[in-house]
Image (cartoon, rainbow, N blue to C red):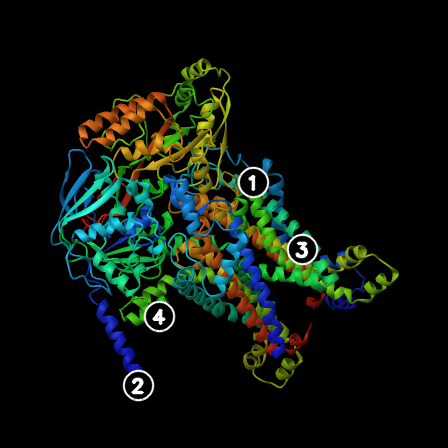
Amino acid sequence: MKKGLAKLTLALMAAGAISTSAHAATTLVYCSEGSPEGFNPAFYTAGTTFDATSKNMFNRLVEFKLGTTETEPGLATSYDVSSDGLEYTFHLRKGVKFHTSKDFTPTRDFNADDVIFTFDRQGNKDNPYHAVSGGSYEYFTGMGMDTLIKKIEKIDDYTVKFILTKPEAPFIANLAMDFASIFSKEQADAYMKAGTPEKLDIDPVATGPFQKVQYQKDSLIRYTAFKDYWQGKAKIDRLVFSITPDASVRYAKLKAGECDVMPYPNPADLKQMEADPNINLMSQEGLNVGYLAFNTQKKPFTDVRVRQALSLATDKSAIIDAVFQGAGKAAKNPIPPTMWSYNKNVVDYPYDPVKAKKLLAEAGYPDGFSTNIWAMPVQRPYNPNARRMAEIMQEDWSKIGVKAEIVSYEWGEYLNRSKKGEHDTVLLGWTGDNGDPDNFLYVLLGCDAVGGSNRAQWCNEEFNNLLLKAKQTSDKAERTKDYEEAQVVFKREAPWITIAHSVVYEPIRKEVKGYKIDPLGGHYFYNVSK
Amino acid sequence: MFQFIFRRLSLVIPTFLGITLLTFTLIRLIPGDPIEVMAGERGVSAERHAELSAQLGFDKPLYVQYYHYVTGVLQGDLGNSLITREPVMKEFLTLFPATIELAFCAAIFAILIGLPAGIFAAVKRGTVIDHSVMTFSLTGYSMPIFWWALLLMLVFSVNLGWTPVSGRIDVVYWIDDVTGFMLIDSLLSGEEGAFASAVSHLILPSIVLGTIPMAVIARMTRSSMLEVLSEDYIRTARAKGIAPWRVIVIHALRNALIPVITVIGLQVGILLSGAILTETVFAWPGIGKWLIESIGRRDYPVVQGGILIVACIIIVVNLLVDITYGIVNPRIRHSR
Amino acid sequence: MTTSTKTSTTDIPLTAPVPMTPLQEFWHYFSSNKGAVAGLVVIAIICFMAVFANFVAPHSPSDQYRDALLLPPAWLDGGNWSFVLGTDDVGRDILSRLIYGSRLSIAVGLVAVTASLIMGILLGLVAGYFRGMIDTAIMRIVDIMLAMPSLLLAIAIVAILGPSIVNAALAISIVSLPHYVRLTRAATMAEMSRDYVTSSRVIGASPLRLMFVCILPNCLAPLIVQATLGFSSAILDMAALGFLGLGAQPPTPEWGSMLADALQFVQRAWWVVTFPGLMILITVLAFNLMGDGLRDALDPKLKQ
């Protein structure tokens, strides 16, 4: 009995020792909107997961420069591209340390083996790690990396060469994406040897500014600043993700000082946040677009005049006011204005029901026709209320005699059916992955994507050739020219009504310094101080 | 006696199988494709879709899926979550302590307030006290608890700032996960103020969740006390000149408590239902919120497994209540 | 029933005992319970509002006054007496929406209770009358349903059928079914052993006649009480489903979904959240009060 008691006191003392100095450390609390799906970013596609993993724990060969969509050197100090655009040689950074976890202590610095392991695991079905933890690498396959990368060669410990099957200019931007986060091969080998390979995806060590200490499911994630981080230790000592799904509760916590930074505020609360002296309301145009896609393979939308007429008949400003409550900007191009190669000179269709009616008559529909509008059942950043949006468009179109019925399905069903083209017109949108125009234009409007994410089922040779040309050169000026021209073709052909780009708001507490909104939608805390 | 227990136990097996069948069917009737939901706007190619559904076993005939499910369940394997890919059982076990902690504190609150209120009302029968206790308890019983939760949070957390808004403990405390029960873990950590912080985070959710059980307990205690107080032996005791409080506490209460204890046992189902709403409002990381979110995400294995475990808990508790009641009251044991 | 006449003489000692008709007797007991009467009055008012919503409500529930967004209640600063309880985020009058909402809540309660009452009586009568295999099968299903938290089951059913007010009512009636089945079955079994049932059977009454003409009227009392209380839980469950986004879809002015829609304004405009909740509480409380009164008045055991 006495012995037991002594043990308990010892345990208590030990526990106390670990957690002393808790109050001296500066802690930043981020009220995140949901739980991460897991701790290996290569498996998932949700931004919530990336915030908790890749953005703050991991590094990639190239990184996005904070606050922009441009890339900068990361774990690779530089790279060379061969003249045919098929070989990329990366020169790796020296002296980069990995985190230490409870059951793994790294013995060496980051090197070429880690890079090769990271990509080989995802692309090579024979890699012993390929099938571990379910083994589906959504982004890797989604971005076409499995067919693009032919071979990865180790030149020496600090030089790696990627050989591609075809020239692909967005490749570098792809490598800055979350799925390309670098893992430690040494840790992977150690776990494989111990027979517990799945632990790599639960407690990975990485090279990033913060290291994970503890995850309490659906409640908290705790990180400490990594003191050997290659860019220097972060200014805050501790980072906590307090998982709070409800936006009004997040705001209540922000006001009460229970959190320092919160994402996705209610549009309704913005005015109050702006007036609050303790809160600094930051905002930036998001890298997204909300659109209505016509099914261009179905009559009457096969006729470009019908598409143009409906574009003319839609009053975007009413939508911006009612649906976005001002937190949005009318869109004229399929890519957002913050993205390079955005064509400022494109002229949008004005709101002109008279001209619309005339065009419709020319196309052979003087009395209009019946159609449908599919409205999404969920709230997305690019469309906070699809039903309301559909109601406004329904009203607008009825003025030129087009009777539209509003249709909705359960989200999974909605995505699947619209992919197959069962709709007449469908509301949807897109949030950029890597800041490259190709990621919007080719993914959403290219001929390859018909029957997939090309909801307009639109394959235009002129447009598609411009995109293919831009893919094959890594000269940015040349690419910009091609994309600008493609946007003109797009506007003329009107496969979509481009509706809006939403504005991202992020309230932070006044004490928080150095925070920057990421146009790609991530949340980074390395530069933040308090 | 054993025959009685055996009879009750034998009824549990078909119920259990029925529940596995019901959860299995229900979840497959829900429209929507979990693979599409996972992929979102990006979408997956037809080949990849087929590959994933083979990986998840959705391509097999339903009866085969059901067979795998039941044999898995019997071996304690409830499958893996489609979203996190973790075993459902493991997720359940990490979240369950939070729900238990909340339900336990709510039950304590309900008993501490409900029991004395009921006794008091019965003793002062027909007075203003009785009427107000009964009115209060009926109001509590009629409370839409999600609204009650919001109201309390708005008043005490947002406006007055007396209690924290949500969460289980203040983030300045870094508590190791030892038992999963924040009250115990915060004590074990030895950090100053951690325990107080954990308690303060529990106050509002417990009150909200405990409100309906409290009302039920108060009403049950009152009517059971009234019945006992009118029994002959109480009158005799009174006539003998035993002090009134002694009559109430020693003689009446002991007998009046039996039905009350049963009622407390039967509140488990209500607590778990209420936990869904309470946890949703307070962002409490327990199983109620977990289940609701999983339904939204079409996470079949989680919903299926989660409902199954919850139903099993309720069955076991009801069984225990039944058996205790049978032990206490022979008339029930021999009926049927 | 003799005991009751005796007690009434003690209440009114000087008049001669006049035997009361069952209805008079019922009213006598019911009206002596102040709470029950209060409940009845409130319910009457709510039913009146529901039926005559078009005339009572000052505005249409869906009219949006774009220049009067989130107006506070009339008695506060900035309030306007044409919007007594204030307006919501798109300028709809909250009072009018509450009044129209009572129509929905009463309708949902009525549909859910009637549906589960009919199904419950049928299943309970069959189980109690025939016993044997049928009984076992029905009672096992009831056991299974009782083992699931009712809200969870309702959520699952609504998720299958799709969120709408009709489906929510259906889900609520399904989850409340077990109580009616159990109650009817127990009452049927008790009545079955009575002499009058045996004699009717000897005369040659058909099972249908026995079930519906002889037995059913005699087990109505507990069912009426259960139905009244079922009304209150139907309204509560409906609101909970609406709150979780699985009940009525906007812009339907259902109380629970009104509350859920207004949730994002909770910090700015307390009234959009407070009044719908209060309305739910008052209605549910009224039904519970009346149910209590009914139980006391209909249950001879409790008459003292």
Would you place residue A96 above or below residue B103 in this image?
above
Residue that numbered label 4 is attached to: B184
User: Residue A484 occupies which quadrant of the picture?
Assistant: top left
Three-letter residue code for mark 3: Gly
Instruction: Determine if marks 2 and 4 fall on one subunit.
Output: no
In percent of width and height, residue B130 lies at 57, 66
Would you place residue A135 above or below residue C258 in this image?
below
First in sequence: mark 3 vs mark 1: 1
Three-letter residue code for mark 1: Tyr
Residue that numbered label 2 is attached to: A2
- Mark 2 neighbour density, 10 Å: few (under 14) some (14–19) many (20 or more): few
In front: label 1 or label 2: 2
Q: Nearer the viewer, residue A201 or C87?
A: A201
The chain carrying label 4 is: B
Label 1: state its secondary structure: helix
In percent of width and height, residue B155 lies at 39, 54
In percent of width and height, residue C217 lies at 76, 57
Instruction: Determine if marks 3 and 2 fall on one subunit.
Output: no
Instruction: Determine if marks 4 and 3 fall on one subunit.
Output: no
The chain carrying label 3 is: C
Residue that numbered label 3 is attached to: C120
Left or right of A208: which side holds A198?
A: right
User: Residue C9 occupies which quadrant of the picture?
Assistant: bottom right
Task: Residue C152: tell me if it is visible.
Answer: no
The chain carrying label 1 is: C
Three-letter residue code for mark 4: Ile
Q: CA distance from mark 3 to mark 1?
A: 30 Å
Residue that sits furthest to the left in the current view: A94
In the image, what residue occupies the spot 30% across and 44% down? A140
Question: On residue C100, which mark appears?
Answer: 1
Left or right of C150: which side holds C222?
A: right
